[in-house]
Each structure stands twice: as C-alpha cells, then as structure tokens.
Amino acid sequence: MAVLAFAVSDSFLLAGTNGNGVWRYPLSLLSTEIKRGLLRTQMDCELDQNYPNPFNPSITIRYELPKDSMVRVSVYDILGREVAVLVSERKDAGSFEVKFDASGMTSGMYFYRLQAGDYFATKKMLVVK
C-alpha cells in the first residue's frame, strides 16, 4: 500500500492510500522530530498490477523497494515454468519499472513474481494476440 496524499482535518493527520482507504492519526501523538528514513523502512515492498491487462505485445511492470535488496522479477507460464527473468540484481531502495515483451509468446495467462529479500509477490497477466 502506498500513500498518495496527506491532509490535516480537525485534530488528525489523514493519508489517502492507493488501496482506496484513508489512514487517520491523531496530531497530538505526532513528534516534532523527524527521523530520516523512518517512514521508508516501515513500508513493505510493493508489486503493482500490470496495465493494461490483457496486453499485446509489451507491458511495464512497476515495483517499489523500501530498502536495498537483491531483486528477482520472473515470468511464469500457467504450468509454473519460468519463461523469462526480467531482473536479477541488487537494487537500491526506490521505485522501478521493467519492460516485458511477450511478442514471442503464445496467448494465455502468465504470472510475474517479485522476490526482494524475504518478500514475495505474484500477479497475473493475460497475453492476447
């Protein structure tokens, strides 16, 4: 989940998220001291759903890392066979994009998986030709 916007209302700090939720925190509990990197290290990795879905022939896969990690982004067919490795390297914390070209693949359901340290996430995508 990522925070998209902040607002202050009455005695609360409000944060709108990409999960269509609103997080509310009492202002009275906020510290005036800001510790560098505190919010970033508390976040989880995030793997976004590809868009458009279905697609032909290529897409961009986006992901976020809260800390430096060894990263692997792979694509699997419906039988669980690895058909492509898009990323396999150490990455610094931040937001990333990787392009996937499925022009040499058949139409059907595929899965893409992010592994970053102990974090794993898998999403599905549909190739239509």
Image (spheres, rainbow, N blue to C red):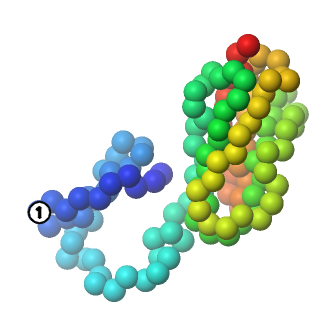
Q: Is residue 123 above or below residue 92?
A: above
Provide residue 14's location: percent of width, then percent of height. 26, 58
Q: Is residue 117 left or right of residue 11?
A: right
Question: In the orientation shown, which residue stands out farthest toward the top?
Answer: 129
The x, y position of residue 78, in whole percent, is 80, 26
Where the C terminus falls, by quadrant? Answer: top right
Q: Amino acid at mark 1?
A: Asp
Q: Number of callouts in the render?
A: 1
Q: Position of residue 12 (x, y in %)?
A: 19, 64
Q: Is residue 115 left or right of residue 24?
A: right
Q: Quadrant of residue 30?
A: bottom left
In this image, 43 relative to 92: left or right? left
Q: Is residue 29 left or right of residue 107?
A: left
Query: Which residue is more in the foreground, 80 or 90?
Result: 90
Q: In x, y percent, where is residue 94?
A: 59, 62
Residue visible at 37% across and 82% down? 34
Q: Is residue 122 visible?
A: no
Above-or-below relation of 80 to 32: above
Quarter-of-image position of residue 25? bottom left
Label 1 belongs to which residue? 10
Q: Can you see residue 19?
A: yes
* Residue shown at the point (15%, 60%) measured from the top left: 9
Furthest residue in direction left, as rendered: 10
Residue at left 57%, top 43%?
A: 48
Residue neighbourhood size for the residue with mark 1, other residues' Cα within 10 Å, grouped as few (<14), some (14–19), many (≥20): few
Q: Secondary structure at mark 1?
A: loop
